[in-house]
Image (cartoon, rainbow, N blue to C red):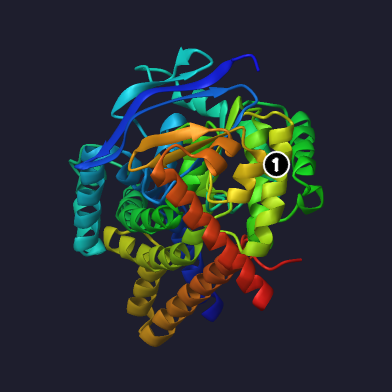
Amino acid sequence: MLTDFVSYIIQGTVTTICVTLIALPSGLLVGLGLALINIYGGRWLSWLSSTFSLLMRGVPPIVLLFILYFVLGGNGSLINLEPFWAGSMSLGIVSSAYQMEILRGALLSVSGGQMTAARAIGMSRLKAIRYIILPQAIRLAIPPWSNEASIVLKDSSLVYALGVPEILRRAQQLSATSQQPFLAFGTAALIYFVLVFATNRLLDFISERSKLPTQPV
Amino acid sequence: MESNVILQAKNLTKIYGQNVIFKDISLDVTQGETIVIIGPSGTGKSTLLRCLNLLTRVNSGQVFLDGKEITAQGYNEDFVRQHIGMVFQNFLLFNHLTALDNVMVGLTRVKGMKKPQALEKAMHELTRVGLADRAGHYPGQLSGGQQQRVAIARALAMDPRVMLFDEPTSALDPELIGEVLTVMGQLARDRMTMLVVTHEMGFAREVADRIVFMEKGSIVEQGSPDDLFNHAQHERTREFLWKITELYGNKEKQKGGQ
């Protein structure tokens, strides 16, 4: 009975991981685009992306999730996606604002001289960003991004509210049917912890590996 | 020497807000010539260099490279800069790339050269500045003098028509200045066309074909090293040279005293 119990929750783990693997990269892609137009896109685009970021970060994710859900999915919505897709993409959109801020900070931390030097050897702005600025900014962004990755992983539990059968949803059902809330939610907590821990360690490893040598050899 | 003008500045004026950085500057740079620009800080020497390769826009005036006006509307700036090398005071090597990749990146990404050729060319340039054995080092692993020599190699790799040096030794420890000046001296002897902003009077005296003295945004006087050091026409030129030479004398004395 216990194995059934645990395997039921573990099936939700797959869903949780899938939600995260959709939300995080799509948030990264949108966030990167926003960060780039925020810094290099001129006044209007900069204002637009800043405003987007301000709105997204100023409202609880669960509220945004409901609003976006009724745009992307659900009855009578325009696009009518499955809850799983609508939820994952909504999370991605919310996360894109945070990822934009992370990348913006990282891009601005690369000294202006790097752009000047790149332009001086004849690179266009676009090439300079692609080959000189971004590779340095991404290194700087890994530690804060690791933090955002664990937040998205944990916030994926919010799609529970849309009826997506991820970890929390299943734990809730088990708790109700088995009358063992501590076991049900304890298992959920443990799974989340292991996932977040593993994610952070992986990103720490990547960050360490990508560090530029400064000491003489 | 046959006058074959590579780079020509005509009546350049640069204004930031209310500040006139320089006004009505004209300068011809002939093939193979080494010109040293000297003058007090804040006289627009560095800005002038940046205007010549279009990193900064002039407010008025024209710049010609090989007879073509590069300040003309719609002229491809990136193309211009491929042909004008620049070396900066603070080196500005690409921090995430090894010495070799710093030199190669312009060849592969700007000139579209194939990797093997780019590698060969980059190694050739690193050898030229005496750093072939540091090819795999990152900027953080190199001394200031070595970083600046890599920066010179990076600019040379593009086969520029003219090289601009913006106070290339000002950020260096005194004992590292020599290695950079040696490389620059060799370039001058190889008849690379060079425009150098520096306070290194020894270099100016020995290497320059022409010295240009700038103050308050205008060219006060120009001529051969002998003309300026020994027969300066303007009181202000003599004063500046005397002061800066005295400063050097003091440095020498301090070194000796330690």
Name the one closer to the observer, B210 or B16. Answer: B210
Q: What is the x, y in percent for residue B108?
A: 65, 32
Name the one closer to the observer, B225 or A125. Answer: B225
The C terminus of chain B sits in image quarter? bottom right
Name the one closer to the observer, A129 or A190. Answer: A129
Q: Which residue is mark 1?
A: B185
> Would residue B199 appear left or right of B123 to someone viewing this image?
left
Q: Which chain does the numbered disc 1 sit on? A: B
Q: Residue at x 65, y 25 (%)?
A: B32
Q: Residue at x 72, y 56 (%)?
A: B137
Labels in figure, total: 1
> Would residue A78 appear left or right of B38 to someone viewing this image?
left
Q: What is the x, y in percent for residue B153?
A: 68, 41
Q: What is the x, y in percent for residue B61?
A: 33, 22
Q: Residue at x 40, y 44 (%)?
A: B235
> Would residue B212 appear left or right of A43 to someone viewing this image?
right
Q: Residues within 10 Å of mark 1 (few under 14, many from 20)?
A: some
- Whether A6 is drawn above or below B214: the answer is below
Name the one closer to the observer, B74 or B7. Answer: B7
